[in-house]
Amino acid sequence: MSDPTAINFAIEGIGFWGNGLPDWNAARRFLADGTLPDNPPAKPSPQLLAPNERRRAPDSVALALEVAQAACAMAGCDPATLASVFASMHGDLAITDYICETLATAPESASPTKFHNSVHNAAAGYWTIGTGCMAATTAISAYDCTFAQGLLEAVVQSQASNAPVLLVAYDAQSSGPVDAISHSEGLLAAALVVNAREDARGPRMTLSLRPGAATETGGALHARFARNAMAPMLPVLEFLASQARGQLELRASPLQTLVLHLLPRQSVEASA
């Protein structure tokens, strides 16, 4: 029996960046046969920013903008028109650690630029300024449920507005004393353009909430980036790459599970 509260939506665009896998095609090849690209870039370099800003941008911002641009390009969407949800467990812990250490040891030498980049919605700010986007943007952090809550927020916004919404999920390296409490390794980000319209293109899924703990799974991509704070999103990307049937569960809170189903292609055609 179908869930009357489930939301049907499509994934119109995907962007991905992780250490050694600098785009979605590279991630798909890795999932298919373990192939890694030769000489991948060490860091993302989003062309949205001017060269000087690109060099100064913190890793978290560069990650977010790189995948956001890729997802919009795949979807064929004008970034200036899309509402967006930026989801990160940590924001930028390297900058947070710098500010805390500087305030404790030499507060008069704190960098205004680093303070500017320390806020949790810094990446969203760079994105809206760089694209000239005047649509609403939301920044979300929900510890290890961050991606699930970000996806839920983006899909509900799309259903309410009857328009596509950009979801950007990212986390970078942790450092300093906070690292012992909430560890994160390397660089990892993904972006999805989700669209709840019935005529939306791309793989279609349903999303619903149920009470109880999630049965969490993960494949090769999850194993590679398991120590990054945004690793909980990776089963969704593996799900999309494999076009798997059945359901996928994500931890949405200590008491709730986000349940995703990938719809068969024929049901997409029938509903078009």
Image: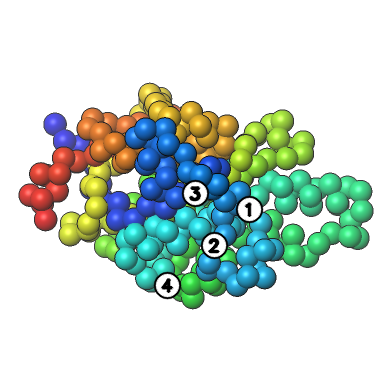
The 10 Å Cα crowd at callout 4, few under 14, some 14 to 19, many 20 or more, is some
Query: Mark 2 against mark 1, which lies toward the viewer?
Result: 2
Say which residue appears at 38% left-offset and 48% top-offset. 25
Q: Position of residue 267 (x, y in %)?
A: 11, 44
Q: Is residue 2 above or below residue 16?
A: above
* Residue 32 badge: none
Q: Label 4, secondary structure: give it.
A: helix
Q: Is residue 186 left or right of residue 214?
A: right
Q: Which residue is mark 2?
A: 46
Residue 18 in sight from this viewpoint: no
Q: Label 2 sits on what residue type?
A: Pro
Q: Label 1 sits on what residue type?
A: Asp
Q: CA distance from mark 1 to mark 4?
A: 23 Å
Q: Quadrant of the N terminus?
A: top left
Q: Label 3 sits on what residue type?
A: Pro
Q: Which residue is mark 4?
A: 80
* Residue 59 badge: 1
Q: Label 1, secondary structure: give it.
A: helix
Residue nearest the viewer, comparing 33 with 120 = 33
Say which residue appears at 43% left-offset and 30% top-offset. 220
Q: Which residue is mark 3?
A: 22
Q: Earlier in the sequence, mark 3 or mark 2?
A: 3
Of all residues, the one furthest to the front in this rendering is: 38
Q: Position of residue 127 (x, y in %)?
A: 52, 65
Q: Quadrant of residue 19?
A: top right
Q: Label 2, secondary structure: give it.
A: loop
Q: CA distance from mark 4 to mark 3?
A: 24 Å
